Amino acid sequence: MSFLTLIFKNPFRNKARAFLAVIGIGIGIATIVALGGITTGLTQSLDNTLHEGGADFTVLSKKEDSQGTPYGTETLDEDWLNKLKEIPGIKRVEGIYIATVPVEDKFGMVIGIDPNNTFDISSMDVSLTSGQFIKNEHEVVIGKLKAKDLNKKVGDNLTIDDSEFKIVGIYESGDPSQDGVMAHMKDLQKISDEEGKISMIYVFADSGADVDTITKSIDNKYGDDLNTITSINDIKMVADALNMVNGASWGISLLAIVIGGIGIINTMIMSVYERTREIGVLKAVGWKKKRILSMILGESLVLTVTSAIVGSIFGVIAIELAVALGILSGMTPVFTMGTFIQGFAVAIIVGLIGGLYPAWRASRLPATESLRYE
Amino acid sequence: MVAIVKIKNLKKSYEKGNIKALNGINLEIEKGDFVSIIGQSGSGKSTLLNMIGALDTGDEGTVEVAGYDLTDGKNLDVFRSKEVGFIFQLHNLIPNLSVCENVEIPMFETKASGKERTDRALSLLNLVGLKEKAKIKPTKLSGGERQRVAIARALANKPSIILADEPTGSLDSKTSGDVLKLLIDLHEKENVTLIMVTHDLNVAKLANKQIEVLDGQILGTDSQK
Ligand SMILES: Nc1ncnc2c1ncn2[C@@H]1O[C@H](COP(=O)(O)OP(=O)(O)O)[C@@H](O)[C@H]1O
Ligand SMILES: [Mg+2]
């Protein structure tokens, strides 16, 4: 038997107590992992939206930023498309119009596109599973999940506002937030009474052109009206929200450290107390203080690292389940190494902080009194 | 003859001096001897044995065992690891470890590798007649068998002295006899000094020398052989 084996065996002598400790700390770790998965997922999906079809950056109305919403509410005139095209280094621009309108019996987001000047659909995270893409007005394509939800197939009609549209195709997207309705831009503008308006412009730079230089020249020239967005951090509200969630995640980490730390101190003090005689024997057979200290500290770490493993697994399962059950619809959680590292770091800190005092106490127990202990 | 234990004027009190557990002990024990310490409950036998084994230090006086000066309280763990093997009234085995693993416990402070530890533990279990039970948990053993495991554990680091505090105190007389026989055999075979605390006169008589303790003082020494 190695010293490590001994350290691994000891914490599970009292199964119920080990279980409770692992659950207690595991919940904190699961929360950290779950939040991490959600934020990274949202960040990546927003980032994909901003670079749809391989766009280098996005242009929004300046007013949008002050209002905060990333798309939809504040629109731009279609003329901007032509003005932007004049800027050196820009190869192509594409405007889309987005509106939240009544779809069948519920409000839903519809993306209006210009079929004559639209993305190369193959470069998007979208592919048609049946039918074809929009060619004319009064045609729409809908996502696979949406189709299932509404029980529609190619050839059926879809009611948007009060008008009937023909479903000409059904698409599939790797990103569930993209699963919705796409309509002809002109139709959607008419429904919303915003003819000639667009919500956002995707800008594609010439290959080799410096995106930074292009955005700077747009900012200089049209900075009063337009806002260039290369990453989601350029959208103040999104950046603020992400910072808030990140802050919350660290807050929960801190809370997990404090609560988990108290829990593990308690667990380990109980364990040391119950093993007073045994620790006396270890001293009698010549164990040094340092070895007793490392054993108890090691046991504490075994408990918290087990919690980190269990918590990480549960965090991932909980979020995936929430997505599958539609509680967190329209998002793909993304779990990165960094999230798990944060979880394990918290667990190790809890193990060290929580284990130190009980370990120190154990190492200082007077041998004779420990052996007299009933 | 070489004295392995040299104690001069050893005093130890508890409860702010109200309990004088040891009240001026002077004692020498020869290397390789078998000595019993006898006396009533509360007379200070265990306290004396613990001082010899460096589990505690006195308030006054000097203790020297196997060449180590234990008076200043330094390196006591090294001394315990190298020179003494303790056997208590209660076996004090670790319940979640196998019999063999329990015997390995003292060897963690030595340089022995994992395999060396296991091999030595198995050969010690063979010596106490428990090789077949090496893999099982001590909770499955009888009282006498557990005490044999404790004896094997005490021998783990080849101590020069074995300190047994009422080793048969919680065993029936038949089992007691077997355990005592084993202890005495080992003492003779391994030429290890054996100091045994007991309050049973018949047990004490098995030793070469009996030391009688009363109220923290040595009443007298009786040599049999
Ligand atoms: N750690 C301690 N704290 C307080 N009193 C103690 C302690 N150890 C021993 N004593 C007291 O010292 C006296 C001698 O105890 P001990 O050596 O255990 O006696 P024995 O082993 O002969 O029964 C007893 O009165 C006992 O209560
Ligand atoms: Mg006693």
Image (cartoon, coloured by chain):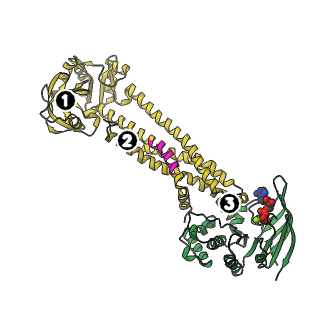
Chain colours: A yellow, B green
Q: Chain of mark 3?
A: A
Residue in view at x 53 percent, y 61 percent? A5
Q: Is mark 2 within 8 Å of ligand 1?
A: no
Q: Kindly identify the amino acid type of the residue bearing the numbered disc 2.
A: Ile
Q: Do circles 1 and 2 both sit on a common chain?
A: yes
Q: Kindly identify the amino acid type of the residue bearing the numbered disc 3.
A: Gly
- Say which mark, if any, is on residue A319: 2
Q: For residue B70, say whether it is visible.
A: no
Observer-nearest residue: A20 or A251?
A20
Q: Mark 1 and mark 2: span between their CA atoms?
A: 35 Å
Which comes before the other along the chain, label 1 or label 3? Answer: 1
Residue B204 falls left or right of residue A142: right
Which comes before the other along the chain, label 1 or label 2? Answer: 1
Q: Kindly identify the amino acid type of the residue bearing the numbered disc 1.
A: Thr
Q: Do circles 1 and 3 both sit on a common chain?
A: yes
Q: For residue B91, say whether it is visible.
A: yes
Residue A160 x %, y %: 19, 25
- Say which mark, if any, is on residue A280: 3
Residue A172 falls left or right of residue A310: left
Q: How many marks?
A: 3
| Magenta part, dominant SS | helix
Residue A304 x %, y %: 52, 49
Element assignment for label 2: helix
A23 in magenta: yes
Q: Mark 1 or 3, which is nearer the eye?
A: 3
Residue beneath disc 1:
A118
Task: Give the residues drawn in magenta, as a range.
Answer: A19-30
Q: Chain of mark 2?
A: A
Which comes before the other along the chain, label 2 or label 3? Answer: 3
